[in-house]
Image (spheres, rainbow, N blue to C red):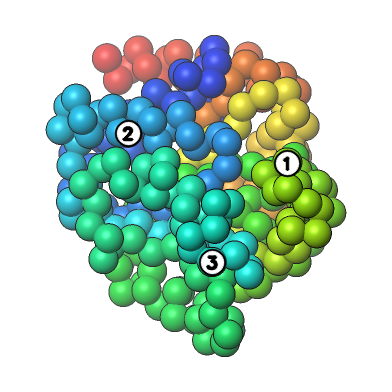
Amino acid sequence: MEVVITPDYDAISRHAAGIVARLLYKKPNAVLGLATGATPLGLYRELIRLHRQEGLDFSKVTTFNLDEYVGLPADHPQSYHRYMWDNLLSQVNVSPSRVHIPNGMVRDMEEYCEWYEGEIARAGGIDLQVLGIGRDGHIAFNEPGSSLGSRTRIKTLARETVEDNARFFDRDEDVPRHAVTMGVGTIMEARQCLLLASGSLKAEAVAATIEGPITCQVTASALQLHRDAIAILDDQAAGRLKRREYYEWVFRHKESWLR
């Protein structure tokens, strides 16, 4: 896994957006895997800026989101449908027919999850998957204990995740307890993964992901086995890394070689 340590959150967002933009310039019909949460917001703002000011084109891009809450309609203020359209999709020239966000309201979820996996395959697979990380080291909603070979399915959310999400809802009983999510195995099939992490609250999970054992208790640790995974961190999120000096050394020399 390549580790990029940046000074702050804005630098994470710019670096990640540069990677996405280079892919779209090279492959205009790329398939992007998208994430929600606070961390990707800066990336999405930078992509919007690149679209508006530099003509970054999304017209042929296909998108697949990682997850959605079960029981929230698409127009709910806290649904991930709403999040994606408010924070990115409505502000670039993406075709709505190429947007895929899991539906948390379907009745036959098993059949739907198989369909979603099939749609990813029919699109040719995901070229680049954006990922955040939970405080317990989960990616998407693959909570601790999830199979590292798992596919798109319903997951019961861990208590810690429910508590983290409670700030977005008026009442505790309104916080979803289940989500439909891509599996770890689905994520690992993306041709490139970008793991973004910011802040000291993520430092322990980041260290476990990058330097700890590969374990289903920290599902992000599966990325150690990915052929092209990049972790983009700010100074605080990198605070528990034991080999930080090495990662910075490697990045400096890579940059000088690229120049």
Q: Does 26 sit above or below residue 64?
A: above
Label 2, label 3: how many angstroms apart (C-alpha)? 27 Å
Label 1, label 3: how many angstroms apart (C-alpha)? 19 Å
Residue picked out by circle 3: 73
Residue 100: x %, y % from top left: 38, 64
Q: Residue furthest front?
A: 170
Which residue occupies 18% across, 42% down? 57
Q: Amino acid at mark 2?
A: Leu
> Are the residues tagged 2 and 3 within 8 Å (C-beta)?
no
Circle nearer the viewer, 2 or 1: 1
Which residue occupies 58% across, 52% down? 78
Circle 3 Cα neighbour tier, 10 Å, few/some/many (<14 / 14–19 / ≥20): some
Circle 2 Cα neighbour tier, 10 Å, few/some/many (<14 / 14–19 / ≥20): many
Residue picked out by circle 2: 47
Q: Quadrant of the N terminus?
A: top right
Can residue 129 be seen at all in this image of the molecule? no
Can residue 220 be seen at all in this image of the molecule? yes
Q: Does dot 3 land on a helix, a strand or a loop?
A: loop
Q: Does 146 sit above or below residue 34?
A: below
Which residue occupies 21% across, 47% down? 93
Q: Amino acid at mark 3?
A: Pro
Residue 167 is labelled as 1
Mark nearer the N terminus (1 vs 3): 3
> Are the residues tagged 1 and 3 within 8 Å (C-beta)?
no
Mark nearer the N terminus (2 vs 1): 2
Could you say which quadrant of the image residue 63 lies in? Answer: bottom left
Q: Quadrant of the C terminus?
A: top left
Q: Is residue 223 left or right of residue 219?
A: left
Q: Does 104 sit above or below residue 7?
A: below
